[in-house]
Image: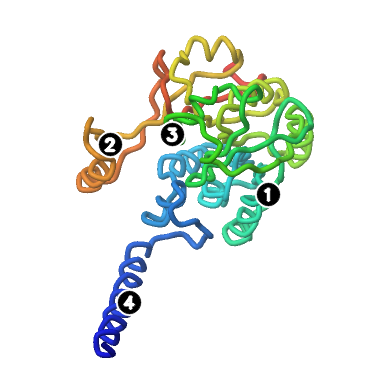
Amino acid sequence: MDSFSSALRYWDKRLSRLRYSLVKRLTRKAPPLFLRGQDIISLGPLANGVYDPVMQQLMHHFAQQGFQDFLIDIGANIGLVSCESGSCFKAVHLFEPNPYVASVLKVNCFISLKNQNYQIHEHGLGARDEQLTLHVPYDNWGGAFVAPPENAYDLAQLSQKDGFDRFDLDNYGIVDVQIRNADDTFEQLFQPLASDQHRSGVIKIDVEGLDEFLIDRLLAKLPDDFSVVVFFENRDTTKTLSAFQQQHPGVGPVYSLTTDATRMAGVPRWLNSMLNWLRSQETLRLKPAPEHMGIGDFVFHIPAKNSPAH
């Protein structure tokens, strides 16, 4: 019996070493950030070294095209977008209301943006100063949301984005968060940027259902001599481009973020990813948004009002 137990311990140790070596090999490109195993937003950077290659390429592109004054990351989470691309900008502002996530955000920014001018704002943006309840999916802390009526999406849409058939509180952690008036916040943010002659930048909005509300407030408060590129996410399957442009007069042409990757229907995601990896690296493309926008990431430009575009 002792010999059998010794053999089990021996092989368990060998398997542990094998698993360690395999994980070390598979994550050799992982960024030097604090990531959470099994969390959806952490898997990409752990395996490939980059959270969102498309977003990273576009951030670098627009910074090189004259929008390098500032990056405003609304819904920063643990900072993957800003930590990957923040070095391209003169100033970085990150908004994250979840106090637990903000603790990790501080560490990741300290690691990646140590030579940058950055500021973390530990609150969300809304219609007024208040405290709200944030619902945090246990396996996707980047998908946290506040429920209706503040949110434009209903509970069915919010549940579906997290892979659930219906809304069930057992699938979420509950966190009380501070929300501040978006109008006041934007005014307080743009004034010092203007004083520093920082008037051209990139704004990323990813707030799970409050994106269009913040686009409205941004359009109302953006100084006339500012020029910004705005990234936002749409998860409303009924949204049309015509309706979006009517609801937000002042935005420039809207583009969808796409790649030339092949997505074969009925084929598991991992197999699609493997096939695209074998083909070659995906090529980023910005295409005019279709009338039926669908679920995806979009970008538009708000030019300065004294620019030739106006």
Q: Position of residue 174 (x, y in %)?
A: 63, 42
Choose the circle earlier in sequence order: 3 or 4: 4
Q: Is tag 1's residue or tag 4's residue first in the polypeptide sequence?
A: 4
CB within 8 Å, label 1 to label 2? no
The residue positioned farthest toward the bottom in the image shown: 2
Q: Nearer the viewer, residue 195 or 264?
A: 264
Q: Residue at x 60, y 15 (%)?
A: 248
- Which residue is nearer to you in this view: 51 or 169? 169
Q: Position of residue 194 (x, y in %)?
A: 75, 36
In the rendered structure, which amino acid carries the disc numbered 4? Answer: Arg
Q: Residues within 10 Å of mark 2 (few under 14, many from 20)?
A: some
Front label number (3 vs 4): 3
Task: Give the label on residue 17, or none.
Answer: 4
At mark 2, the secondary structure is loop
Kindly report the distance in space between the C-alpha atoms of the residues bearing marks 2 and 4: 36 Å
Gap between marks 1 and 4 measured at Cα: 36 Å
Task: Kindly identify which residue carries mark 2.
Answer: 261
Image quadrant where residue 293 sits: top left
| Disc 1 residue type (three-letter) | Pro
Could you say where residue 150 lies in the image, as x and y percent from the top left? Answer: 66, 24
**Side (left or right) of 122 relative to 63:** right
Residue on which disc 3 sits:
164
How many angstroms separate mark 3 from mark 1 (CA)? 25 Å
Task: Identify which residue is drawn at 26% across, 87% down.
Answer: 1
Q: Contact (CB < 8 A) between labels 2 and 3?
A: no
- Residue 250 appears in view: yes
